[in-house]
Amino acid sequence: MIPLDDARIRASFVNASLRERRAVPLPPAPESLSWVGLDYLGWRDPKQPKLGYVVAEVDGTPVGVILREADTRPRSRAQCAWCNDVELPNDVVLFVARRAGDAGRRGDTVGTLLCAGFECSRNVRRLPPSAYLGFDREAARDRRIDALRDNVTAFLRDVRGTG
């Protein structure tokens, strides 16, 4: 992912008004983040824990969305729609994002199950267990990283209305 400063993070939000962009609490010290190995930047609002924020590169441009955690939890152990990790060390919750533009102003939303603390980049980089003799664990990990990037991009395009 390309390194982002505060101004680019704020400007990236496609489903937020100018006032909402100004109110977004920025992640702690984005200038000191390790951008290598980060497929998207995700964080929670410390004052409003039901809110989350995600920024990723889509077609060479940073695209950000404001997410709201649904009030209900999945009834059973759920799988994250982005990292598809079956051995998650963390909770998965339903997040909903208002669509960008006129659709969002009409109340249209998009929802998805995500890791509660946005740990997907770390999850997909763990080597998977060996499925069979000769299984290429590194290639499987690379496929999971590519799939995560594709899933994040598809969701952000959907919110943006260019899916």
Image (cartoon, rainbow, N blue to C red):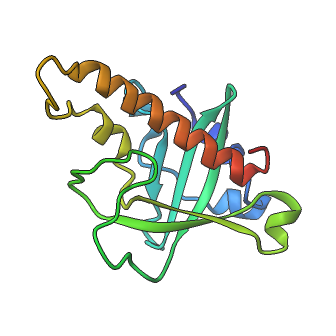
114 sits to left or right of 104: left
The one nearer the camera, 51 or 25, is: 51
Q: Quadrant of residue 110?
A: bottom right
Q: Which image quarter is the C terminus in?
A: top right
Say which residue appears at 46% left-offset and 34% top-offset.
Answer: 147
Residue lying farthest front?
133
Residue lying farthest right?
102
Residue lying farthest left?
133
160 sits to left or right of 105: left
Please tell me whether residue 74 is drawn above or below residue 41 in the rendered image.
Answer: below
Say which residue appears at 39% left-offset and 52% top-offset.
Answer: 118
Q: Position of residue 112 (x, y in %)?
A: 53, 61
Say which residue appears at 75% left-offset and 50% top-offset.
Answer: 160
Count the marks: 0
Q: Position of residue 151 (x, y in %)?
A: 53, 42
Say which residue appears at 78% left-offset and 61% top-offset.
Answer: 17
The one nearer the camera, 6 or 94, is: 94
Q: Position of residue 92 (x, y in %)?
A: 35, 63
Q: Quadrant of residue 157?
A: top right
Q: Position of residue 94 (x, y in %)?
A: 47, 68
The one nearer the camera, 120 or 128, is: 128
